[in-house]
Image: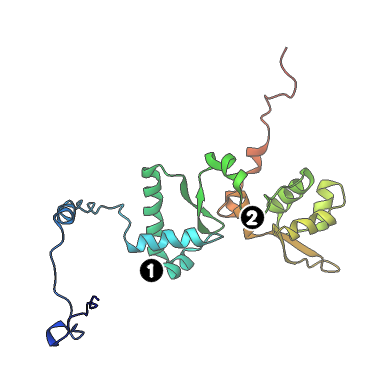
Amino acid sequence: MRTPLRPPRGPGCRRRYDRLPENHPLPLRYRLEGEEVAAPPAAGELTRDERLALVEAALLAADEPLTARKLATAAGLADAAEARRQVKRLQVLYEQDDTAFQVEELAGGFQLLTRPEYHRWLVRWRRGGQELRLTAATKETLAIVAYRQPIMRADVEAIRGVHCGDVLRLLMERGLLRIAGRHDSLGRPVLYGTTRKFLQWMGLNSLADLPRADELRRPAHQSDKPSA
């Protein structure tokens, strides 16, 4: 009959919990691999430091344009001027890297967007929501309000020659129009104006960026009929 093996006992065989284990050298294979460490990239003007990385992260997480003040608060910067400087650095970095992203100044703020040339592919994989589509009547009404705001419904209807109450209500539901005030005439009718979402949807920073009326007119020398 075999005697079962028993673990050694005694003071020298007890595990010590009051001190760390001794260091042992790594195998030669791991020591050789550890020596092949690539040198860190050289720091330059366009290197992403912590401040620039925070600005980029804030723009990526935002669903709408961020003003310079909000961007400075989100990234922990000193002021709005510092936020604008960091955005300029990021814009230059994207241009030099030839990435698919760009930072645009829209609706009084900054927003991280993909470049227009990638729209036809990305629109197929839109994760949520429907693309805002407007009919010819709604576009015409929206253009009148944009150029003549603040404007009463009666003035819009006088220009279009048709009833516009339902169209104005639809544009307000879409978030493109708002009530900008009331006229001083009898009954104090509502005045309509565009919203910040309108600027964002049109890709404008302010109403001053709207095309001038003379730029939208067809030149006099052009004709609708093809030349013989």
Q: Name the disc covering residue 98, or none.
A: none
- Tag 1: amino acid: Leu
Q: Is residue 133 visible?
A: yes
Q: Which residue is denoted by mark 2 in the rendering?
A: 128
Left-right relation of 28 to 154:
left
* Quadrant, the N terminus: bottom left
Residue 119 x/y as whole percent: 57, 42
State the SS at label 1.
Answer: loop
Left-right relation of 33 to 226:
left
* Quadrant, the C terminus: top right
- Quadrant of the image occupied by residue 197: bottom right
- Quadrant of the image occupied by residue 171: bottom right
Q: Which residue is denoted by mark 1 in the rendering?
A: 77
Q: How is the image coloured?
A: rainbow
Residue 87 x/y as whole percent: 41, 56
- Quadrant of the image occupied by residue 191: bottom right
